Amino acid sequence: MNSQQQSGTGGRAALEFHASGIAGTEEALCEELRELGLPSVRFNRGGIPFRGTWRDGWRACLQSRIAQRIHLLLARFPAPTPEMLYDGVRDAAWAAHLTTAQTFSVRAVCLGSEIKHSGFAALKVKDALVDHLRESCGERPDVSDDPDVQFFLYLAGDKAALYLDMSGEPLHKRGYRRDAGEAPLRETLAAAILRMSGWDRKTRLLDPMCGSGTIAIEAALWAANIAPGLGRERFGFERWASFGEESAQELRELKGELRAARAGQTPRIIAADVDAGVLAKAQVNARAAGVKLAFREQSVLDLQPDESAALIVTNPPYGVRIETDQLFPRKVMAAFCRLHGWRVGLLAGSPAYALEMSPRPRLRLPLLNGDLPCEFLLYDVP
């Protein structure tokens, strides 16, 4: 790695990054990163690689609504044996980012490799890092559950890729959700299904089962062009040894540019729920996010077509985390069938929702909401 790459500044050297997202959202993530103008974005089912400068990596952390993490590639090398893994890590260009003054952690994934145990692989990475610093500096850095520098090893077959995690806390933690309610939806998944719905950020949008308001808030942030990372206290890369005052000043300038890019006019976005207490929590979260929504205390079962056609994007309760009436899916889909000319997107945690709608969905995509398997269903109501 040359000095410009090591400095942590927004130099012109080409770096390789990797954006990871919830499984099934890769196409939406790829489309988003291209729309943001990040260089050399390529589609990959396991995550989206792109190239660029430090500033591009920072922008991805600040602006991506769908990515869970952004990683910086440090090195690729053959690692068919523990010894070669150890040597490859020692030779990788990480010394500018980790010193004995920083704490660190290592996470590993092993797929089809001779080294089958991820814990053992992570231990070999840790040993290589610690031994190198002990030999060169006379002391070693500490491992921590809240590390300054997070390493990630991806071992597939006999090939290793070593990354630094730029994000720190996962990127779905925007900082605005004061109360997540009983069945929280990850902000990144909410942003992904909004994009998958084909929303143009102009059409009126309604979430009739809004819960803590995540979908409506993410829609408002997107419509107003508010970078989701602006609400975070800091990112992982800000704790690296390579991130000095020059980098901090560049990051402040970048944040200022993103704040200035906020849009003026936004469409009407309605967050509705039958539970007044839940609706109050959504209002608190919306205020924390700095967005304005229209709130309505209303049952989804009372929906009627009004004004012009609108878009519904919602995550209905489905009896795993929240108890519901067994006939609830049938009642909900009957209510949606009344909305002629509307588009309806729902993240369904039960197959009953798809069974209760007569037109076939234009999109049916399996996803994970946390550890719960679900489907994103998209309908154009005839």
Image: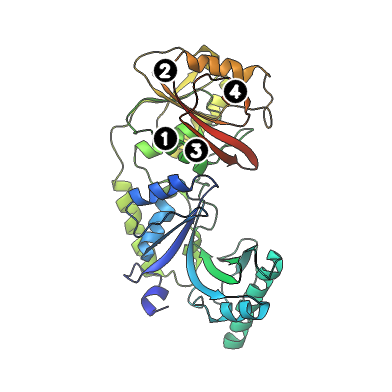
Instruction: Give the class, few, some or many, for how many residues have Cα within 10 Å of label 3's Cα (few <14, many ≥20).
Output: many
Q: Which residue is mark 4?
A: 355
Looking at the image, residue 206 lies above or below residue 243: above
- Point out the frontmost of discs 4 and 3: 4
Q: Which residue is located at x 53 percent, y 58 percent?
A: 168
The residue under label 3 is which amino acid type? Ala
Disc 1 secondary structure class? helix
The residue under label 2 is which amino acid type? Pro
Instruction: Give the class, few, some or many, for how many residues have Cα within 10 Å of label 2's Cα (few <14, many ≥20).
Output: few
Please tell me which of labels 3 and 2 falls first in the chain: 3
Please tell me which of labels 1 and 3 falls first in the chain: 3
Disc 2 secondary structure class? loop
Q: Which residue is located at x 57 percent, y 79 percent?
A: 88
- Point out the frontmost of discs 3 and 2: 2
Q: Is residue 370 left or right of residue 262?
A: right
Residue 219, label in figure = 1
Q: Is residue 290 visible?
A: no
Whole-Å distance between the Cαs marked 1 and 4?
A: 28 Å
The residue under label 4 is which amino acid type? Leu
Q: Which residue is located at x 71 percent, y 69 percent?
A: 120
Whole-Å distance between the Cαs marked 4 and 2?
A: 17 Å
Residue 115 pos. (x, y %): 68, 70
Residue 190, label in figure = 3
Residue 182 pos. (x, y %): 64, 32
